[in-house]
Amino acid sequence: MSVTTKDVAYIAELARLSFTEAEKEKMTSELNAILQYVEKLNEVDTEGVEPLNSIHDQVNVLREDLRQESIPNETTLMNAPDRLDRFFRVPKVIG
C-alpha cells in the first residue's frame, strides 16, 4: 500500500489543511516511509498467539462496596472560606 500526492491532497482537504506542492511531496514520502515501517509487522509470526484485550492479568480490581456514615456538615464546612447555612458558597462562574 502506498500513498500518492492525490491521496495527500484529498486528506488535506478533509482536514481543512492547505499544503504547497513541495509540502505535498514531502508528506507523501513521509507517509510512505511510515507505511513501509508498519508493513514490517506483517512479517511477524503470530501463529498460535491469542489476541489480548489488555496487557494486565488483573481481572477485577474494584474494592467491595461498603456502606459508611457520611461526614457531618459542620466538619465538612469547618474550613470553608465562605458558606451559607449548610452549603459551600462559591463565586458565580456562569455569566
Image (tube, helix red, strand yellow):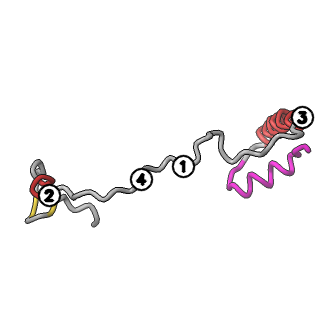
Screen quadrant of the C terminus: bottom left
Judged by depth in the image, the label closer to the viewer, 2 or 1, is 1
Q: Residue at x 71, y 49 (%)?
A: 18
Element class at badge 3: loop
Residue range (magenta):
1-18
Which quarter of the image is occupied by the N terminus?
A: top right
Mark 1, Cα crowd under 10 Å, few <14 / some 14-19 / many 20+, is few
Image position, residue 61 (x, y; %): 50, 46
Q: Which residue is mark 3?
A: 45
Mark in the foreground, 4 or 3: 4
Task: Compute the Cα span from label 2 to label 3.
Answer: 61 Å
Tell me if 82 is positioned left or right of 60 in this view: left
Circle 2 — which element? loop
* Secondary structure type for disc 4: loop
Please determine whether, in this image, residue 10 is positioned above or below residue 28.
below
**N-terminal label among 2 and 1:** 1
Amino acid at circle 4: Glu
Say which residue label 4 marks.
64
Which residue is depicted at the point 87% across and 33% down? 44
First along the sequence among labels 2 and 3: 3
Upstream in sequence: badge 4 or badge 3: 3
Location of mark 2 (residue) = 72
Seen from the viewer's position, the closer of residues 20 and 14 is 14
The three-letter code of the residue at mark 1 reads: Asn
State the CA–CA distance, disc 4 to disc 2: 24 Å
Using the numbered discs, state the Cα–Cα distance from disc 2 to disc 1 in whole angstroms: 32 Å
